[in-house]
Amino acid sequence: MNARDLILYQREGAYIPRVAAVHDLCGYGKCSLGIAIPVLSAAGCDVCPVPTSLFSAHTKFPTFYMHDTTPILDDYLDAWAKEGIELDAIYSGFLGSAAQVGAIQRLYREHPQALRVVDPVMGDGGKMYPTYTVELCEKMRELVSGADILTPNLTEAHLLTGLPYRGQDLSRAEVERHAAQLVGMGARLVVVKGVVRGDGLIRNYIAGEKIDLVEVVGEQLPFMTHGTGDLFASALTGAVMCGRSVYDAVAFATDFVRDAMRITRLQPDNEVRGVSFESLLGQVAALVG
């Protein structure tokens, strides 16, 4: 099947789908739930947060406080189960501990029909994030199996597969090798993000067990900013939940991140403040209907 034709969620009438967003919450610096909640809400979704940790600010700041929420998650999800909450999708990102993989797996067991979107937030630039451990990265591999959509950047693809990290200038054959290994680990679809080859373009690749590798090309801007990975995965998930094809969802997310980065460049303290997407939420809302 072609990724242009593959639709993973059928939106029906006025129904508002429920999405469990399993991410951290940052007080300052836009990322994680601070992105997922508004973007998915604009896409007409009922966002049900599962906070994996609380941060005073994201980890690009030299000083931050982190509170690991692992001890509360069993009671949190027990309360959901007693209320009979139903979910249409489970979208996970940053985790505060290796044990939190079990909380996501519990959601999978209790909501077997829910779409599974896994953004394996583990690192960038060839390195793990400072709050991550080898144990947590190893446990993250368990979420590859059964993921309907897996969205690793090249560092995360390296950490999940064990293949060497060779920077962001990967050939199509090298990307295909990473994607094939992740599909072999059990992912239904893989979106490998952030391949750049010095030609002013950024390339994201879609692959699956029955989907040939397809390239989605966007403009590469000459700077980086925090939170773009979360924005990409949230916009992708929102588009999928609006009934868009996988290809169209990846193309939308690619362009949406580019547009947000252009606005970010005009903001004070943009190097650490995070990606500014708020004024563009109308683009997401336009996907509904």
Image (spheres, rainbow, N blue to C red):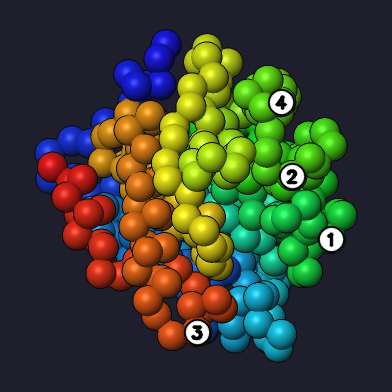
Residue 209 in the figure: left or right of residue 132: left
Q: Quadrant of the N terminus?
A: top left
The tag earlier along the polypeptide, 1 or 3, is: 1
The picture places residue 118, in percent across and down from the top left corner, at 56, 44
From mark 2 to mark 1, how far is it between C-alphas? 21 Å
Q: Where does label 2 land, which residue?
A: 167
Amino acid type at image mark 2: Gly
Instruction: Depth check: give the residue in front, 69 or 32.
Output: 32
Residue 46 in view (yes/no): no
Q: Give the secondary structure at mark 2.
A: loop
The picture places residue 223, in percent across and down from the top left corner, at 54, 63
Instruction: Depth check: give the residue in front, 76 or 181.
Output: 181
Q: Are marks 4 and 1 in contact (CB under 8 Å)?
A: no
From mark 3 to mark 2, how far is it between C-alphas? 27 Å
Amino acid type at image mark 3: Asp
Q: Where does label 4 land, which residue?
A: 174
The tag earlier along the polypeptide, 2 or 1, is: 1
Q: Are marks 2 and 1 in contact (CB under 8 Å)?
A: no
From mark 4 to mark 1, how far is it between C-alphas? 26 Å
The picture places residue 101, in percent across and down from the top left corner, at 69, 52
Number of marks in the rendered image = 4
Q: Residue at x 26, y 34 (%)?
A: 243
Q: Where does label 3 land, which residue?
A: 269
The tag earlier along the polypeptide, 4 or 2, is: 2
Q: Where does label 1 land, which residue?
A: 133
